[in-house]
Amino acid sequence: MPDSQLDTHSDTAGKNAPTDQQPTTSEPEHRFSLISGSVLDRADGIIYAVVGACFLIGAICALCYSFWDFGTNITAAIGAGRGDPALLAKAIIQFVSDLLLVLIIMEVLGTVTHYLKSHATSLRPFLFIGIVSATRSILSIGARLSVEGSAVPSPEFTHAMIELGVSAAVILALGITLTLLSRMASHGGLSE
């Protein structure tokens, strides 16, 4: 037998011989897996898109409500006694708190958008959400204490101070985590 025929024969024998790289499932099962995976991936994308649209609508509604509520509170504060400083401060702090809620919603929307583009999630937006939420909590407690002034009973004041401390610790811990993640990503050790 000539050498060229031997090479051809050995090539065809190698193609028909079972290898570790060939799928162990039959052709119909493999096709079903591919089709079902594709359908589920599309459904996943559609659901994320619908959820993202709902977050966008929610953010717009929350923003509109924030402005409406702020206008109503300022009008009431000015009409109630020539601009009572306590009511004005409460209205402004409530407005800032509402805007922070809109930022939280937008961060979640950004996470959904990022997932739709890259099909990967990131830890960074959730850390930002935690920091903004804790900041919002601090503002809320501070507003309540400043409006009530010295009329706050001792147990409530102690509880408020504990809440402030916990919120500050959360901000510190999440900030440190965010810094560490950024350093690890800049050194190529982690993809965010």
Image (cartoon, rainbow, N blue to C red):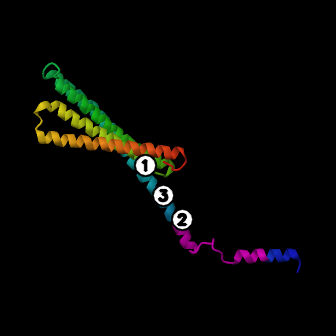
Q: Nearer the viewer, residue 73 or 138?
A: 138
| Helix, strand or loop at mark 2 | helix
Principal secondary structure, stretch drawn in magenta: helix
Q: Is residue 58 visible?
A: no
Mark 1 Cα shell of 10 Å, populated few (<14), some (14-19), many (≥20): few
> Height in image: 12 above or below 90?
below
Quarter of the image where one finds residue 66: top left
Dot 2 alpha-carbon crowd within 10 angstroms: few under 14, some 14 to 19, many 20 or more? few
Q: Give the x, y percent position of residue 161.
A: 21, 40
Judging depth in this view, the residue of 1 and 141 nearest the camera is: 141
12 within the magenta span? yes
Q: Residue at x 12, y 42 (%)?
A: 155
What residue is disc 2 on? 34
Q: Indicate whether 24 appears above or below 110.
A: below
Name the amino acid type tagged 2: Leu
> Is disc 2 in contact with disc 1, using a CB cutoff of under 8 Å?
no
The answer to which image quadrant residue 68 occupies is top left
The residue range painted magenta reads 10-34
Which mark is nearer the camera, 2 or 1?
A: 1
SS category of the residue bearing label 1: loop
Residue tagged 1: 123
Residue type, mark 3 in image: Asp
